[in-house]
Image (cartoon, rainbow, N blue to C red):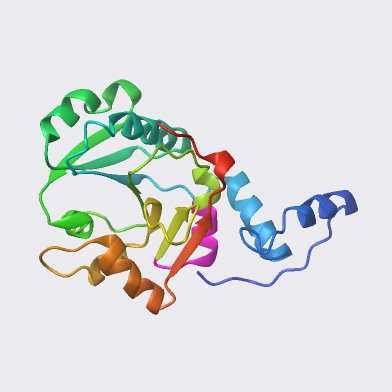
């Protein structure tokens, strides 16, 4: 997205508070901080669609984490949630439902091989920036901060993680990600993210231990 250079005047006490938010990671500089807080205040960085990966054999064990993610997504403003299911998928459906009682649209997809293979089933349906939840543990996160971080940097993918060696967690993707997914078995963690890192199209959004909860 093209940016315009502007000149503004700001109260000194506000400027001091703004400077205190700059950490060189989540907030790079004054311009980035101003853009971030404006986007947050004006509510312009909303994403409406999220996909939750729940196709593994441990799907039932992950239902509390799925429910936690749905609550976080709803509070952020996501209204359309797609859950990728596989083994014991019917049990997941029975527990989670269609979301109508919470004013959500929850649907399900089944098929595709691997996490990326499952995601590829949606390539003709998703045309805008979207969120993916790849569950291994319950993780509380401020989606507003994550999405603004992603949109201000504009990579193809942002991963919210505590450890850059652990590629599980919350992702924000641009729809161009689908072009990188080959037919057949494909994993986001092993096949897609290495390509993104090689092309400098993947960023990490740091999550600190105090933001995590355990099962």
Identify the magenta region.
147-156
Q: Nearer the viewer, residue 102 or 115?
A: 115
Occupied quadrant, residue 83 = top left
Task: Answer whether residue 48 is magenta in the image.
Answer: no
Residue 191: image quadrant is: bottom left
- Chief secondary structure of the magenta portion: helix
Outermost residue, top side: 101
Give the left or right position of residue 104, taking residue 143 as reference.
left
Front residue of this view, candidates 174 and 63: 63
Percent position (x, y) of residue 56?
19, 44
Would residue 151 be counted in the magenta stretch?
A: yes
Snapshot quadrant of residue 7: bottom right
Q: Is residue 190 above or below residue 132?
A: below
Name the residue located 24 percent from the left edge and 27 percent from the top edge.
Answer: 96
Answer left or right for 99 relative to 48: left
The residue located at (27%, 34%) in the rendering is 105
Image coordinates of residue 185 in percent, x first then y, are 13, 63
């Amino acid at each position: 997205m093209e940016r315009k250079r502007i000149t503004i005047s700001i109260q000194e006490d506000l400027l001091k508070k703004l400077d205190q938010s700059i950490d060189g990671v989540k907030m790079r500089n004054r311009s980035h901080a101003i853009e971030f807080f404006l986007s947050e205040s004006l509510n312009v960085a909303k994403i409406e669609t999220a996909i939750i990966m729940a196709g593994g054999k441990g799907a039932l064990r992950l239902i509390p984490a799925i429910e936690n993610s749905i609550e976080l997504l709803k509070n952020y403003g996501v209204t359309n949630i797609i859950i990728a299911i596989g083994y014991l998928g019917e049990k997941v459906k029975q527990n989670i439902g269609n979301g109508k009682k919470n004013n959500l649209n929850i649907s399900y997809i089944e098929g595709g091989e691997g996490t990326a293979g499952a995601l590829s089933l949606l390539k003709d349906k998703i045309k805008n920036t979207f969120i993916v939840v790849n569950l291994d543990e319950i993780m509380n996160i401020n989606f507003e901060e994550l999405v603004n971080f992603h949109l201000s940097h504009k990579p193809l993918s942002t991963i919210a993680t505590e450890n850059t060696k652990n590629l599980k967690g919350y992702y924000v993707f641009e729809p161009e990600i689908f072009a990188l997914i080959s037919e057949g078995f494909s994993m986001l963690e092993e096949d897609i993210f290495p390509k993104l890192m090689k092309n400098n199209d993947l960023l990490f959004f740091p999550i600190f231990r105090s933001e995590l909860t355990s099962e």
